[in-house]
Image: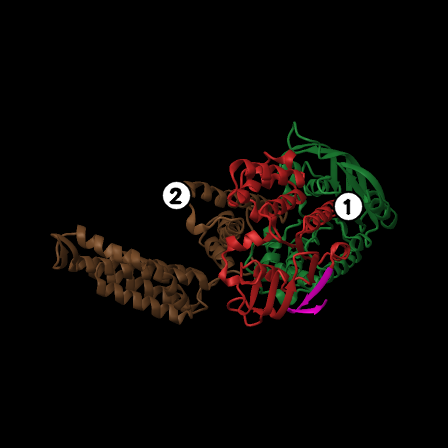
Chain colours: A green, B brown, C red
């Protein structure tokens, strides 16, 4: 079964508003890393929101076509239920962190699942270990650097153990060293069998992807291997 | 005393402020304030920094002293001007009460800061408050300092663009405040919205219940301290009513 | 003469023992693009706040056009250095784009017709005229940054200081931003760029400074 199936997806925020996504179809196999590129406002973030069911459940809007994550139709499940399949990480880490310590932040999601305390503890340890941030356990997320905040935001979602990750420009504010760390972690996560869809501009990060999708004004205009697509797109922009 | 349960701390704060409300004589209030300071000392709270902030309220207290003297009858007149009593013993009496009362309020409230916000979520949840509400409190506590910082940044941006804060004419003051609060309001709305999405995307409210990595547990010290404060408060109050 | 001169400047946030910046000496001219790079947490943003007088150095002194920064008010500094924040949302506070630009212009003391003329020119120059009546915070990330740039540019400062201006911009919008930097230079203004966007810096900087652990390591 495909991890993500997007079938003739169109969407807009208001019934009369501009179409943000126009008739998009693609599939992502389990264990694939797919990069989503395109200019600002082309619908990349909207697509991520559709995968997590935020659209149509949270933001409303009009959605036609179908989005399946691990076979679940996003229209028929609540956002909290879809969270078990797709982990969404957003661009701004500051609005995603609210607990007083990193440990509490990561424990938040498994606590919601009503897991017993020991199991929550095990998951927290595992996530801290995977991301290499065990030494930050008792730190206040507010006092971390931008890169560390992103890691914590990602960890908070990983603690739900979703098989799919949708990352919306999580590296925008990172320096080269921070990007390298996250790139390594992404490759690690793929080895663990996670499917990753990421919105990204940085060529180095895009190069770890198996496939690249290019969006332009809400349409999917390219879908292919990273090296070829990225080259074509960059030369296209040299307008 | 630093390791007390947050619920115990809440009880301490309630006891201290209840006493501050009901006591009505300068001496007992001063005693209460000193006692509060001892509690703060035991909890290793640095009272000094707050005391510095309190300095700004001094002119207000002075004003209160005069108003109390002018408008409350009775007591010995210590200073008068053209028949109006400017300073009376009664005035001194009641403004001293207000001073010690405020000091007790503010310093006992500082006890709150010795636990982190997650502890208060746990305290509220274990006091049978619905967890949704407890987390709302957590989020509010988390973002309050952020908003204060944002106001500061906007103020700086306005000054850099040529507004001299000391010299805004009165008729422009309202305009100035809308400039200051409009971006704040939109940022509050935006943050609240994004945070709600983030929480839900982490399976918040998937079930009616949730579990916790660790729970609060009363220890012997908590029972002793709570018992002491409650009994002492009741004793002092009933004594006061008996007379 | 240097536009900004830093002499042995150190900075330490209150309550922290480790200084963010240590003994920095630097002079910046009001021409060309000076780029200051460094990893997250190397003190870049702190440096920009020192240059604009938002923070005061714990040691050393900073001179702007030969005057001590501590003797100037933020209002006076704002006339000479245009500062675009890392997050431009924080410096946009008016109801419309036009208002936003007029806000600073009004404080220049020009007669009303000249002021209005100036606002129109600036809007035109930054291609914001078609958004004149839009609510600033509803613009896209790139447009907001452009508006913040336009709003501080309207005060005609000799030097523009941009903190991480490429954050959140796609390659095309980065190129647009670059075009505006060129315009600034053509208008005889200096630019200080604080950024770790290597590609962008390589393309536009005329002078490169690397910041590491609170000190400059290369030039």
Residue interval drawn in magenta = C207-219
Task: Looking at the picture, tell me which residue is in the foreground, A36 or B43.
Answer: A36
Q: Is residue B32 visible?
A: yes
Give the x, y percent position of residue B156.
52, 53
Disc number for residue A36: 1
The picture quadrant where one finds residue A237 is top right
Instruction: Answer yes or no: are tags 1 and 2 on the same subunit.
Output: no
Q: Is residue B206 visible?
A: no
Give the x, y percent position of residue C28.
65, 62
Give the x, y percent position of residue B224.
37, 68
For the N terminus of chain C, the quadrant is bottom right
Horizontally, residue B136 falls left or right of residue C206, namely left
| Label 2 chain ID | B
Helix, strand or loop at disc 2?
Answer: helix
As for residue A1 lying within the magenta part, the answer is no
- Residue at the spot x=76%, y=56% of the render? A186
Spatial separation of the CA atoms under disc 1 and disc 2: 53 Å
Q: Main secondary structure of the magenta part?
A: strand
- Residue at the spot x=58%, y=37% of the render? C98
The correct choice, above or below, for A88 with respect to B39 in the image is: above
The picture quadrant where one finds residue A75 is top right
Give the x, y percent position of residue B18.
30, 57
Task: Looking at the picture, tell me which residue is in the foreground, A69 or C20.
Answer: C20
Helix, strand or loop at disc 1?
Answer: strand
Horizontally, residue B77 falls left or right of residue C37, namely left
Label 1 close to label 2 by CB (< 8 Å): no
Task: Looking at the picture, tell me which residue is in the foreground, A192 or B184.
Answer: B184
For the C terminus of chain C, the quadrant is bottom right
Disc number for residue A226: none
Horizontally, residue A209 falls left or right of residue C216, namely right
Residue position marked by numbered label 2 in the rendering: B170
């Amino acid at each position: 079964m495909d991890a993500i199936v997007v079938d003739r997806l169109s969407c807009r925020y208001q019934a009369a508003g501009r179409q943000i996504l126009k008739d998009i179809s693609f599939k992502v196999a389990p264990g694939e890393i797919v990069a989503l590129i395109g200019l600002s406002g082309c619908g990349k973030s909207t697509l991520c929101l559709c995968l997590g069911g935020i659209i149509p459940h949270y933001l409303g809007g009009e959605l036609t076509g179908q989005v399946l994550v691990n076979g679940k139709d996003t229209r028929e499940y609540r956002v909290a239920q879809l969270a078990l399949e797709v982990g969404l990480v957003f661009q701004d880490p500051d609005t995603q962190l609210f607990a007083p310590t990193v440990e509490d932040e990561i424990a938040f999601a498994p606590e919601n699942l009503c897991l017993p305390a020991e199991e929550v503890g095990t998951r927290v340890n595992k996530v801290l270990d995977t991301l290499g941030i065990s030494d930050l356990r008792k730190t206040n997320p507010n006092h971390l650097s931008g890169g560390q905040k992103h890691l914590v935001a990602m960890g908070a979602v990983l603690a739900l153990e979703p098989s799919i990750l949708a990352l919306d420009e999580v590296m925008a504010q990172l320096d080269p060293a921070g990007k390298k760390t996250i790139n390594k972690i992404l490759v690690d996560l793929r080895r663990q069998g996670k499917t990753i869809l990421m919105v990204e501009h940085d060529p180095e990060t895009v190069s770890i992807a198996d496939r690249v999708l290019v969006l332009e004004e809400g349409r999917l205009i390219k879908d292919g291997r990273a090296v070829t697509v990225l080259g074509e797109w960059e030369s296209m922009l040299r307008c | 005393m630093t390791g007390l349960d947050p619920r115990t701390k809440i009880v301490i704060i309630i006891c201290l402020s209840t006493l501050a409300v009901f006591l009505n004589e300068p001496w007992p209030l001063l005693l209460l304030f000193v006692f509060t300071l001892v509690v703060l000392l035991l909890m290793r709270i640095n009272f000094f920094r707050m005391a510095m902030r309190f300095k700004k309220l001094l002119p207000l207290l002075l004003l209160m002293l005069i108003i109390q003297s002018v408008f409350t009858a009775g007591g010995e007149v210590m200073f008068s001007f053209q028949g109006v009593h400017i300073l009376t013993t009664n005035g001194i009496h009641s403004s001293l009460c207000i001073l010690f009362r405020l000091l007790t309020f503010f310093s006992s409230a500082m006890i709150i800061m010795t636990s982190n916000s997650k502890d208060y979520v746990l305290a509220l949840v274990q006091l049978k408050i619905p967890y949704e509400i407890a987390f709302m409190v957590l989020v509010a506590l988390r973002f309050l300092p952020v908003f204060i910082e944002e106001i500061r940044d906007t103020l700086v941006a306005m000054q850099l663009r040529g507004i001299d804060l000391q010299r805004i004419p009165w008729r422009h003051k309202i305009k100035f405040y809308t400039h200051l609060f409009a971006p704040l309001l939109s940022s509050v709305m935006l943050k609240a919205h994004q945070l709600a999405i983030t929480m839900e995307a982490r399976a918040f409210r998937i079930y009616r219940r949730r579990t916790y990595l660790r729970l609060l547990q009363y220890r012997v010290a908590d029972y002793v301290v709570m018992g002491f404060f409650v009994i002492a408060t009741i004793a002092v109050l009933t004594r006061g009513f008996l007379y | 003469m240097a536009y900004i001169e830093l002499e042995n400047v150190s900075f330490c946030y209150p309550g922290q023992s480790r200084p963010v910046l240590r003994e920095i000496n630097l002079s910046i001219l009001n021409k060309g693009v000076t780029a200051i790079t460094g990893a997250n947490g190397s003190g870049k943003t702190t440096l920009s706040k020192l240059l604009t007088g938002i923070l005061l150095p714990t040691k050393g002194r900073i001179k702007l056009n030969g005057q001590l920064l501590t003797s100037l008010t933020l209002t006076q500094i704002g006339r000479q250095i245009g500062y675009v924040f890392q997050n431009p949302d924080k410096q946009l506070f008016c109801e419309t784009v036009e208002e936003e630009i007029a806000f600073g212009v009004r404080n220049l003391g020009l007669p009303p017709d000249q002021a209005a003329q100036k606002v129109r020119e600036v809007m035109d120059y930054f291609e914001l005229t078609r958004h004149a009546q839009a609510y600033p915070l509803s613009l896209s990330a790139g447009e907001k940054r452009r508006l913040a740039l336009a709003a501080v540019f309207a005060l005609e400062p000799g030097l523009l200081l941009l903190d991480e201006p490429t954050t959140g911009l796609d390659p095309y919008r980065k190129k647009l931003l670059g075009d505006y930097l060129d315009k600034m230079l053509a208008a005889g203004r200096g630019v200080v760029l604080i950024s770790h966007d290597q590609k962008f810096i390589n393309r536009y900087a005329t002078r490169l400074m690397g910041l590491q652990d609170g000190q400059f390591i290369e030039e």
